[in-house]
């Protein structure tokens, strides 16, 4: 998903982390164009279109953006998309950002092999496991779950009771060592119903996660 060694940067901005273990903290977001999945409820489909307007950026360019954020007091950087792990050269970028002292989080779709990225220096992963309503569960690499540690997050986006039941099966079968978050598709399932499901199944170590940015700003707004 790079062009001639250049990253396809769809947008960059500083905002709060809307989800994950550092939810509510300021972060620099680097959003890359392109994804190999097509989830039914995806809220960034615009960034996945082949003709999306994007900027060609080098590792140096991206680190310059990160340095500006650092100077403004930001210590987190989130690489997102699309699917950031499709970007050729992403390992170099991760290593360089970590070397700057930044906390690097990768938002990844669950269809990419995490093994090449788990050596030191290691970023933090927020990895999706796509449930039935996404239409993409067949692409999930369940073996990735065992690679997730206590600083990582397994995110399971739910739109229905069927999704919740499947999430429960995945959790009980794989017993993740990382944090597990259940997140509602905005406007498609009531968070209160998800809480009742968690009580019903005794999911005491699982967290309900609401996307903060969709409550602070318009759910369709970009750059937040």
Image (cartoon, grey):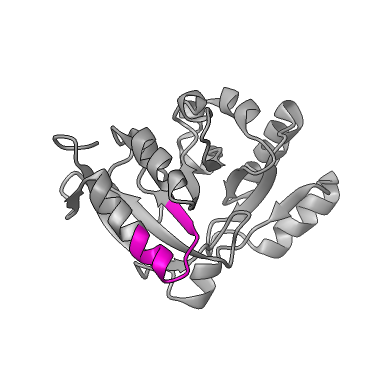
Residue 5 magenta: no
Q: Is residue 153 visible?
A: yes
Q: Is residue 34 left or right of residue 200?
A: left
Instruction: Name the quadrant containing residue 178.
Output: top right
Residue 73 magenta: yes
Q: Which quadrant is home to the N terminus?
A: top left
Q: Which quadrant is home to the C terminus?
A: bottom left
Image coordinates of residue 29 in percent, x first then y, are: 40, 58
Q: Is residue 122 left or right of residue 100?
A: right
Image coordinates of residue 176 in percent, x first then y, are: 71, 34
Front residue of 24/181: it is 24
Front residue of 33/203: it is 33
Q: Is residue 120 left or right of residue 5?
A: right
Question: For the point 21% across and 49% down, which residue is it?
Answer: 57
Image coordinates of residue 158 in percent, x first then y, are: 59, 49
Question: For the point 34% across and 65% down, which residue is it?
Answer: 68
Image coordinates of residue 89 in percent, x first then y, are: 30, 33
Instruction: Name the quadrant containing residue 151.
Output: top right
Question: For the point 51% across and 24% down, which residue is it?
Answer: 115
Find the magenta span and give its range: 67-78
């Amino acid at each position: 998903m790079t062009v001639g060694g250049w990253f396809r940067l769809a947008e960059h901005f500083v905002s709060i982390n809307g989800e994950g273990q550092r939810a509510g903290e300021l972060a620099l977001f680097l959003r890359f164009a392109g994804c190999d999945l097509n989830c039914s409820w995806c809220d960034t489909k615009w960034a996945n279109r082949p003709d999306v307007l994007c900027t060609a950026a080098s590792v140096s360019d991206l680190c310059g953006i990160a340095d500006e954020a650092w100077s403004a007091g930001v210590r987190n950087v989130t690489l997102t998309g699309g699917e950031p792990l499709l970007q050729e050269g992403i390992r170099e970028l991760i290593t360089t950002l970590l070397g700057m002292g930044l906390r690097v989080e990768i938002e990844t779709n669950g269809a990419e092999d995490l093994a090449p990225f788990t050596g030191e220096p290691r970023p933090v992963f927020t990895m999706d496991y796509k449930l039935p309503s996404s239409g993409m569960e067949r692409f999930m690499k369940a073996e990735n779950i065992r690679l997730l540690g206590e600083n990582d997050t397994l995110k399971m986006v739910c739109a229905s009771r069927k999704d919740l039941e499947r999430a429960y099966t995945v959790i009980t079968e794989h017993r993740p060592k990382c944090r597990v978050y259940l997140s509602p598709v905005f406007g498609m399932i009531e968070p209160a119903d998800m809480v009742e499901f968690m009580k019903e199944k005794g999911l005491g170590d699982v967290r309900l996660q609401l996307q903060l940015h969709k409550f602070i700003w318009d759910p369709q707004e970009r750059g937040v």
